[in-house]
Amino acid sequence: MAASTWLVAADAGPQGPAAKTDDRVNAKKQSATPALALNTALFAPGDRICVAVSGGADSTALLRVLASRQQELGLVLSVLHVEHGLRGEAAQQDAAFVLQLADCLAIPCETVSVDTPARAALHGESIEAAGRWLRYHAFRRLLLEDRADRIATAHTRDDQAETVMMKLLRGAWTEGLSGISPQLRLLEAAGRRGWCVRPLLMTGRAEVEAYLRALGQPWREDASNATDEYARNRVRHTLMPLLRQFNPRADEALAHVAECARTEERYWAAELERVLPRLLLPGRPVRGGGRRAMTETGDSAWAIEVLRLRELEPALQRRVLRAAAERCGATLDFNATERLAAMAAGGSHAETRRLSLAGGVEVERTPREMQFSRSSGSTEEPLPSYRLPIPGSVVAEAFGATLHATVRDGFTGPPAEVRAIQPGDRIRPAGSMRWKRPKEILERKNLDARARGHWPVAAWQGEIVWMRGVSLHPNPAGITIEERLEDGTEPCTLESAVRAGGGDENSAQTGS
């Protein structure tokens, strides 16, 4: 469809000689121009705003309204389209639609292709979760490359209502009921902050579609949104229409719940920051008084005096118990929290004196304390970690090497952490489209468990940017790390490690 036929710039204002028409005519035109509510408090003059556009109604409307108010708000706009590798030819048509729309609006546009099924399979995630991670990873890359100050996404009031309902059905705490935040910090590095903003969050989907129809602006329909395969679609198609029968303004009511929950959480976060230092006792008690700090990597121990815990109001008591468990690595649901509260209230002869929580956390009720602890169970001295300045160097004695970090274009950022591989680490080898576990790469080299546990990596902003002996896909920040061994020899490669470990050299693979 030709751009001139489907993109009528009804909100672009008069151009050329027509701009000199009578002021009364201009006023009449402006009164007929479609309007869409926009939270402009999320922007500041001069902001570089990258609009995430899928081609659907919500993101198309967001792009159109921002383009119409670009000069008024003093914004510099760009467009990002993420193709998730899910819908074949239809996805290509979506990308073409977004590129053409951006071109007609004279706004630069970039498309990024990601492999959502591969990430979902690798990490055991749902397609929805994998797609979201990849999408926000692309957002962070733009912010890291300093090509935008904020990413604008087109979440609407309908999305907010659906999110609150899904959280409610899962038994979320108040922070879960806060739903989608109007703004989310995605980056804090090199003295810069990057945000994701949702300027349509208080605007309904019906208003969005009415705005587009008034403009004569078409949009793309994602066929996957019509199925009930995903939980959100079932809530959207079945539950929300039912709720609207009881309250036609159910979406607005749920959005208000989210706003109330968000302000409540801000208060409770400040309150916990004030009271926790007086309530949480680090380490384990020792005879004669005092407490012994936990020194083993992965070990953690905290305690709360029972008498002080009993004095707290239930709302604060629950939050303190959850905070103690979280310090040790466990996330509590309502039932587990209530069991802990019952342990604290039951007196020194309480029937339940011990409770095992998720993440290997143990809770013991003594006559004086509720004691939370987690033990790594390791008898070997843990390897230290080192801070590698970006850019800069560090001597990592435990790994027998010196690491040098260089960057491009004068970029500076927080230090990287040089450490041994940890559970949950993922890397993307150079030339590979898949994220892999470092353990998977090392097992192919026939390295034993001890060697794998001592293999160094460098983590920066939650991502592995260097691994000994493995070439990784370039990271968005352009960080390059080189290794020089303390004895002056060449850095250890996986192939040399196999020979040193007595493995079968012929079985070594590239790991890409």
Image: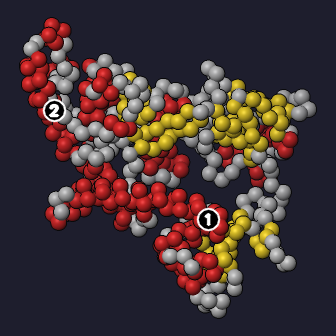
Task: Check the image and name the residue furthest to the right.
Answer: 487
Q: CA distance from mark 2 to mark 1?
A: 52 Å
Q: Which residue does the numbered mark 2 point to in the structure image? A: 34
Left or right: where 26 falls relative to 497: left
For label 2, the crowd category at 10 Å Cα-Cα, with few meaning under 14, some 14 to 19 and many 20 or more, is some
Q: Nearer the viewer, residue 44 or 472?
A: 44
Q: Position of residue 129 (x, y in %)?
A: 44, 49
Q: Residue at x 77, y 42 (%)?
A: 386
Amino acid type at image mark 1: Leu
Q: Residue at x 11, y 23 (%)?
A: 27
Q: Nearer the viewer, residue 485 or 253?
A: 253
Up the image or down, 413 lies above or below 179; here it is: above
Amino acid type at image mark 2: Pro
Badges 2 and 1: C-beta atoms under 8 Å apart?
Answer: no
For label 1, the crowd category at 10 Å Cα-Cα, with few meaning under 14, some 14 to 19 and many 20 or more, is some
Whether residue 232 is visible, yes or no, is: no
Left or right: where 243 falls relative to 433: left
Q: Secondary structure at mark 1?
A: helix
Up the image or down, 439 lies above or below 365; here it is: above
Mark 2 or 1, nearer chain start: 2
Q: Position of residue 65 (x, y in %)?
A: 26, 31
Q: Which residue does the numbered mark 1 point to in the structure image? A: 276
Q: Position of residue 480 (x, y in %)?
A: 68, 28
Q: Nearer the viewer, residue 70 or 141?
A: 70
Q: Residue at x 41, y 25 (%)?
A: 46
Which quadrant of the figure contains the N terminus?
top left
Count of numbered tags: 2
